[in-house]
Amino acid sequence: MPRQQWVIGNWKMNPVTAKAAAELASDLSQSASKLNCSVAAVPSAAHLAAAGNSLSEGPVLLGAQNLCALEVASGAHTGEISAEQLKDLGVSLVLVGHSERRANQGEAGDVLSQKIQRALESGLRPVLCVGEDLATRESGNHLEQVAADLVRVLTPLLDQDWSTLILAYEPIWAIGTGRSANPEDAEQMHQHLRAVLLGLKAEAQHTPILYGGSVKPSNAAAYAACANIDGALVGGASLIADDFMDIARAFS
Ligand code: 13P
């Protein structure tokens, strides 16, 4: 059975206004109807309702950039958003472990496992992001280091159902730099991560592994041609509806 292809736009802390977010979502919703892959937009928490409203009738799924790691639907947790609250907003997937949150919010290890568990238990599809920094890539230790991170985060979750899990390989040096990984290098990492996943759990053969890091219309087809690259997690180019749709078409 071929793996489902996914193209996911991570809008990060963009745009500034809810009106602009709603307009971008509406443009995506209108142009995504004929695609043969799953497409999702992941606005900032401030714009989930506005963007979700624009997406509600169309094929583009709504995602969130973060969720609360605690096992509670509500309570005294200032600044947090529970999985149940996200579900109530129409969210169907959630990013976990993006390198920007690891670097700026210090997220790692157990917290990431807990967030994935909350997502799996509540019916949100977790998108676990992993990737090495430039020094690790240059040391040649990137395959081992990224695999070790993956094993650390997923090992506490071996008794969970992974059928909705998505993995995203995002080398940190390729994020927002315009310097994308060459497709052969990305494919090598994806193959390695696929083997590591399968070593943990047989059902991981169905887990899509997306590539992220300076994906654009001009390089998307080269990634799409790789056997173990099952889609893209797109940052900057996801803020331009036509560019994002060109990328989605490459995986469709
Ligand atoms: P860019 O596509 O802007 O490099 O961002 C990638 C990313 O971080 C997606 O999560």
Image (cartoon, rainbow, N blue to C red):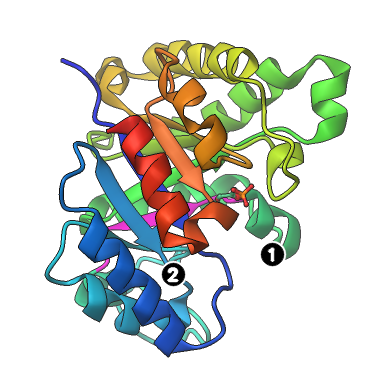
Q: Position of residue 45 (x, y in %)?
A: 45, 77
Q: What is the secondary structure assignment of the residue under circle 1?
A: helix
Write down the residue under mark 1.
105
Quadrant including the C terminus: top left
Q: Is residue 185 left or right of residue 45?
A: right
- Quadrant in the rendering for residue 55: bottom left
Crowd band around label 1 with a 10 angstrom C-alpha radius: few (<14), some (14–19), many (20+)? few
Quadrant including the N terminus: top left
> Which mark is in front, 2 or 1?
2
Q: Is residue 175 left or right of residue 250?
A: right
- Identity, as a three-letter code, of the amino acid under mark 1: Gln
Which residues fall within the magenta stretch? 91-98
Write down the residue under mark 2.
43
Q: Residue reaching furthest left?
A: 57
- Whether residue 229 is situated above or below residue 23 in the rendered picture: above
Q: What is the secondary structure assignment of the residue under circle 2?
A: loop
- Identity, as a three-letter code, of the amino acid under mark 2: Pro
Would residue 93 be counted in the magenta stretch?
Answer: yes
- Whether residue 75 is situated above or below residue 100 in the rendered picture: below
Earlier-in-chain disc, 2 versus 1: 2
Q: Is residue 206 visible?
A: yes
